[in-house]
Amino acid sequence: MDATIFGEIMITIIETKLPKIKTALPGPKGKQVIAHDAKYMSPSLTRDYPLVAERASGAIVEDADGNTFLDFAAGIAVCSTGHCHPRVVEAIQKQAAELIHIAGTDFYHRHMPEFAEKLVSTMPKTHNWKVFFGNSGTEAVEGAIKLARYHTKRDKLIAFYGCFHGRTLGSLSLTASKNTQRKYFGTLLGGVEHIPYPYAYRCALGHTKETCGDEIIELLEQQIFKRLFAPEEVAAIIVEPIQGEGGFIPAPMFFLQELQRICNKHGIMLILDEVQSGMGRTGKWWAYDHAGITPDIVLTAKGIASGMPVAAFIAKDSVMNWKAGSHGTTYGGNPVCLAAASATFDLIAGGLMANAEKVGKHIFSKISEWPKRFKIVGDVRGKGLMIGVEIVRDQRTKEKAADLRDTVVDNAFHRGLLTLGSGENSIRMSPPLIIDEEQADCAVAIMEEAIAETEKGM
Ligand SMILES: Cc1ncc(COP(=O)(O)O)c(C=O)c1O
């Protein structure tokens, strides 16, 4: 570890680029934190393994006992510029000394339009766009539900099985990921219908990653619209272009294009939830960019501000036409958070998005053969640095193996690699967009050992 002056500020740099485990995990100091946490913290939090973070820089996290980990989780795809990027730290510190809060809902400050203009520069040029800032992904989803209902004067909403849009009561009504997330929370928002998401690896009709989903479009048009909701009652279809919590499952391009066609035809708002897949992670600003579509509303959070709480929904200006007082927030668009977001944006635009594409391709060139090399790897999928690995007990039956998945994640942790589970039986790798090929190779090697060890124990 080293302390370096950057601009006027002191930054802690962890010298190593690669992981090093020195103690049993968790170590003695980590154990104390975990015991303390158990006494005071809500037991609803899910921790896959006992990482007790103390400090971090770049793609390396150091725990309370001095072990270092290579971070392929990035705080759930949040630390897009790596941990404590000097430019982000500098922006936060400088802004904190000038103006921390003023409440953008009641007063003006330059950071809101300045950063909104940057976000709008990523949107299709065919329209003008407006932005609303919030603090978390779920808040962006709530705002988008309200905006879609307000604009269309309709109330029905269509979402997908496997999707995750958040945990507050409106967004939870859309979320259809795990029943524990909904259990005992009572009646949720009315007027919500879920339909299947195109999941090529498990496509009942045997379609490929490019063609899976035809039957879902037919279900929507021929069944849902005819038997449940007339399309002119539907306010919005909300979709993740790559399901995140659902298992890092990309929707085929044609499927997103078909959703756009249907939405255009019936005046339905197409909402793209890019909270996990956006901000350059897939090699383009938004995962939907790969399909060349133009949504009505786009949601972003997570990777937008390198860990500071910022979310936004971006809508066509013809859609964001609600009256003053219809929606607001106390903290959304806070100057310090937006300073971090602005620095993050510049770093992503200035090379990290290109790096995500390049290093993502490098990783896929190494791991796409895993289903041939490892009997428990059923599927490898994703785009850029949004990489999913599905673990099965048997490649022929595709039996989902949540226990083996957990073992792989745990084995990787004990070798110094942080990943996260996703969906019922998949692993997600979502490193900071700053990683280089040496770190990518290290992560691949650790994963291969972790999978091989899991197979040995079967
Ligand atoms: C696609 C998507 N939407 C919304 C959310 C909710 O975000 P938050 O946890 O910031 O409320 C998440 C969180 O994982 C997500 O992945």
Image (cartoon, rainbow, N blue to C red):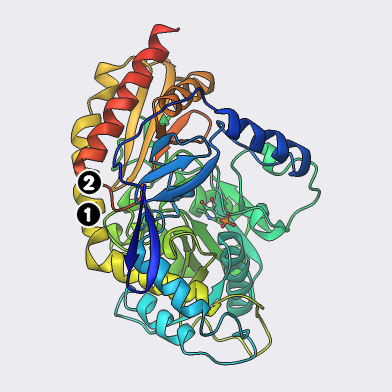
Front position in the image: 242 or 4: 4
Q: Position of residue 116 (x, y in %)?
A: 43, 80
Number of numbered discs overlaid on the protein picture: 2
User: Under tag 1, what secondary structure?
Assistant: helix
Question: In the image, what residue occupies the spot 43% across and 49% down?
Answer: 56
Q: Quadrant of residue 258?
A: bottom left
Image check: 167 left or right of 282?
A: right
| Amino acid type for the residue under numbered disc 2 | Asp
Quadrant holding ligand 1?
bottom right
Question: In the image, what residue occupies the spot 32% across and 32% down?
Answer: 380
Q: Quadrant of residue 89?
A: bottom left
- Residue 310's label in the rendered image is none
Image check: 327 left or right of 288?
A: right
Q: Position of residue 231 (x, y in %)?
A: 56, 64
Residue 328 seen in this snapshot: yes
C-alpha span from label 1 to label 2: 8 Å
Quick check: marks 1 and 2 in contact, CB under 8 Å?
yes
Residue tagged 1:
355
Question: In the image, what residue occupies the spot 39% across and 25% down?
Answer: 415
| Amino acid type for the residue under numbered disc 1 | Asn
Q: Earlier in the sequence, mark 1 or mark 2?
A: 1
Instruction: Please state which of the two labelled residues, at mark 1 or mark 2, is closer to the viewer.
Output: 2
User: Under tag 2, what secondary structure?
Assistant: loop
Q: Is residue 312 above or below residue 354?
A: below
Mark 1 CB within 8 Å of ligand 1? no
Crowding at label 2, few (<14), some or many (≥20) Cα neighbours within 10 Å? some
Question: In the image, what residue occupies the spot 77% across and 43% down?
Answer: 40
Q: Is residue 430 above or below residue 392?
A: below
Q: Position of residue 108 (x, y in %)?
A: 55, 92
- Residue 436's label in the rendered image is 2
